[in-house]
Amino acid sequence: MKIHEPYILYESNNHKFIWLGLDESETEKGILTNQYLIVHGNQGVLLDPGGYFVFERVFENASRFVKPENIKAILYSHQDPDIIGGLTLWLDTAPNAKIYVSHLWERFIPHLGVDLRDRIIDLPDEGMDIDFGSFKIKAIPAHFMHSPGNFHYYDPIAKIYFSGDMGAAVFKDKWYLIVDNFEEHVKLMEWFHRRYIASRRAIELWAKRIEGLDIDIVAPQHGSIFMGENAKKFLNWLKNLDKVGVDFISS
């Protein structure tokens, strides 16, 4: 596959979940970023569309599947610049999109030089169902994994769980889109998760939130995508991860 080209992870008659390609950047030190688009009918929803330097590629690839004016929402997992850095560009190019983000970050985002008073929707700590009329996306609280105001998003039609930074992998050599050998892939993930997740309690609270979700694919904002049995392996690995955050750095 061509890494700059989009890849459809799920497709039915009127619903798609699309990975929007990849940009390799030496400044990211091997932690490459993923962006995703959900299309339902003629409506689009962007997930963590990224920073300034990936905007052109993300915009062009998204425009293959949906008109920019039909992008109804941009869903942000948290406030990191590799996620929200391109927001000023998206406000102009997707003029009808509402911006969904944790209520913690509403007062920080204007420092990007934007006025969101009529477009931002604060996500409450307990999460919510985001209703687009003909379909819904679930905002799942994942606070302190790693951001204190952090959300994952679940598409119940595609059965795809967007896990934000959870699933991040630091590639030393060859990059791949889909995880094949989970046991080997863990070696690329372990340090990030132990260092960035605040506490074991944060994992326990998140694990309760996803009970009962029917998940076929886990799609992270960093790293590679987990499909089928590897999605289950990843979720179980994360649920059982011990000695993270303050316990990790103080051990």
Image: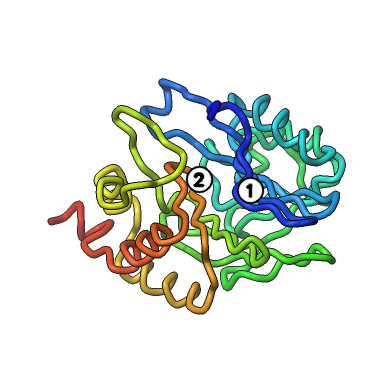
Q: Amino acid at mark 1?
A: Leu
Q: Are marks 2 and 1 in contact (CB under 8 Å)?
A: yes
Relative side of 60 to 155, left or right: right
217 sits to left or right of 129? left
The residue to which callout 1 is attached is 47
Residue at the top extreme of this rendering: 26
Horizontal side of 206 relative to 90 (left or right) equals: left
The total number of labels drawn is 2
Q: Position of residue 136 (x, y in %)?
A: 73, 66
Q: Position of residue 102 (x, y in %)?
A: 60, 58
Say what amino acid the circle numbered 2 marks.
Gln
Which quadrant holds residue 63?
top right
In the image: residue 167, left or right of residue 102: left
- Which residue lies under the disc numbered 2? 221
Residue at 56% over, 53% down = 77
**For numbered disc 1, what is the local secondary structure?**
strand
Of the image marks 2 and 1, the number of the one nearer the N terminus: 1
At x 59%, y 60%, the residue is 153
Residue at position x 54%, y 73% from top?
Answer: 213
Residue at the (30%, 27%) spot, across then down = 173
